[in-house]
Image (cartoon, coloured by chain):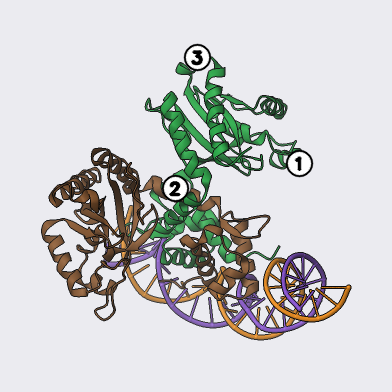
Chain colours: A brown, B green, C purple, D orange
Amino acid sequence: MPRLTPALVRGLDILELFLDARAIDGYSAPEVATVTGLPRATVHELLATLVAKSYLRKEKVSGRFHLGLRVFQLGNAYGERIDLVTSGRLIAEEIAAECNETVNVGMLDGPDVVYMAKVESRQAVRMVSAVGRRLPASCTAVGKALIAFLSEAELEALYPSAAGLPSLTPRSIVDRAELLAQLAEIRRSGLAFEAGESTPDVSCAAAPVRDHRGAVVASVSVSVPDIRWGQRAPGEWADVARRGAQRLSSVLGAR
Amino acid sequence: MPRLTPALVRGLDILELFLDARAIDGYSAPEVATVTGLPRATVHELLATLVAKSYLRKEKVSGRFHLGLRVFQLGNAYGERIDLVTSGRLIAEEIAAECNETVNVGMLDGPDVVYMAKVESRQAVRMVSAVGRRLPASCTAVGKALIAFLSEAELEALYPSAAGLPSLTPRSIVDRAELLAQLAEIRRSGLAFEAGESTPDVSCAAAPVRDHRGAVVASVSVSVPDIRWGQRAPGEWADVARRGAQRLSSVLGAR
DNA sequence: TCGGTACGTTCGAAATTTCAGACGTTGTCT
DNA sequence: AGACAACGTCTGAAATTTCGAACGTACCGA
């Protein structure tokens, strides 16, 4: 593998600061400097470059920086080209219409889940996720349905035996043995469940999506507030997720 | 303005190659080298960096590069933060439901229009645009509704008196005087029209959207195949666009 | 099998960029 | 008002990165 280009790395690092939800108000140049630890002069040069290339926009009055049009264009170009996004959105809409609950399609990015498509239930319940957002995989049904199909080596790389697991709520799984047990069960049944582990008082069911080669590439989940979760048997919710995942799999050419 | 960082510029230039629709099959490293004119070794270093940072993904078998997850995340982060995208989508859906034609919300980026939201008519007619895509402003109703409100200096910068105008179809406006005349009329009436100037056999009506300070920041258009365009008076289509633009303006805090 | 070509990678000298420090400006506090 | 602090910009010397050239490999056609 060739060497990396530090200047580019630093520039992209700055860009990624803006992924954080805290960045709604943007960043000022000094803030970027302190957060990244880069010298003042360097930060100004990098920011000027990002602005010149429309990846950032400098607000005239406050002098704060915000994400620019170009990242929007690139993001949409990605979305257009990835079937998962296009087809996932379609199928999520079908399922949501059917059960009127929030439906998510996600894929794995390192130890995190990134949501590729999302349709909110009409009966709005605030959820943590949003398209493009990432959440620790072990805390979500979508994520567990994905990491369950990793090899042992990959799992070990993501969750070194020593360290603890990330946690979002008091009910998040923090015990590695417990996680492994659940993953085994998910592999067996082809279904993943979650009980308030990423958002309090919300339960989820998720099922894996396979591509044309049979590899698990994504998963589909239904998120249901506990108030309504009890109104049906867990198996019913799981069926909704499973049917969605199967439909998406066949769109992607599985079987 | 501080100096620019060439390494970063070059990296982002490479990224932007992938905006092009021709990039569906991705690019190989040698292709990137010839297109950009950069030395082979440099291209490999930059590509490796972009891959390491997940802005690109290298296909294992073919060795070709494609856009990566990170650009998707950034694009969505942008979309979440810009009211125009969120509210625009909402209002575009309302209008589309009302008239069952394709609705676009666009803003200006240099001499181009970038589409921020789009809802297709059920009666699908292939359109050139897609969210995130850009089209020459002078060829579209959305674009004309925007450049009409630029200052003379800005206009002159975008369309130097000498050179010709970009053109997408035989009906695109190529005469600068003709364009200026139309822009004056648009300023007067607050409405822009287009007759097959960006897509053959499709007509559009567009109206400007204003932000809380009264500045024109976007525009809303209805695109109608000529077969159906004649079924209503042009003023009726224009009204659809105008009402949408007004609703979006008030969401953005106009007046 | 054997040239030939195209490609990815490596290396180090040359060229460029980085960044500390100085300066001018703006805004704030006393 | 005056002093101080925070910030943006500029400069040039130091340090780093860039990229030409060479090497090894894979693939192709003869």
Q: Quadrant of the N terminus of chain A?
A: bottom left
Query: In this rendering, does residue B132 appear at all?
Result: no
Q: Badge 3: few (under 14), some or many (20 or more) residues near its Cα, within 10 Å?
A: few
* Residue bearing mark 2: A77
Cα–Cα span, label 2 and label 3: 34 Å
Question: Is residue B120 something one can see in this rendering?
Answer: yes
**Dot 1 corresponds to which residue?**
B153
Q: CA distance from mark 1 to mark 3?
A: 37 Å
Q: Chain of mark 3?
A: B
Which badge, 1 or 3, is on the more N-terminal residue? Answer: 1
* Amino acid at the residue labelled 1: Ala
User: In this rendering, do the residues under marks 2 and 3 share a single chain?
Assistant: no
Which image quadrant is residue A33 in?
Answer: bottom right
Specify the subunit that label 1 lies on: B
Residue B180 picture location, percent across and down: 71, 29
Left/right of residue A206 with respect to residue A34 in the rendered view:
left
- Closer to us: A176 or C8: A176
- Mark pair 2, 1: CA separation: 32 Å
* Category of crowding for the residue at label 1, using alpha-carbon neighbours closer than 10 angstroms: few (below 14), some (14–19), many (at least 20): few
- Of residues B242 and B43, the one nearer the viewer is B242
Please state the chain letter of the residue tagged with numbered disc 2 in the rendered image. Answer: A
Label 1 secondary element: helix
Q: Are marks 2 and 1 on the same chain?
A: no
Amino acid type, label 2: Ala
Residue A89, compared with residue B235, is above or below; it is below
Q: Residue at x 61, y 76 (%)?
A: A39
The image position of residue A135, as x and y in percent, is 34, 62
Mark seen at residue B230:
3
- Which kind of residue does numbered mark 3 sit on? Gly
Which residue sits at x=57%, y=42%?
B252
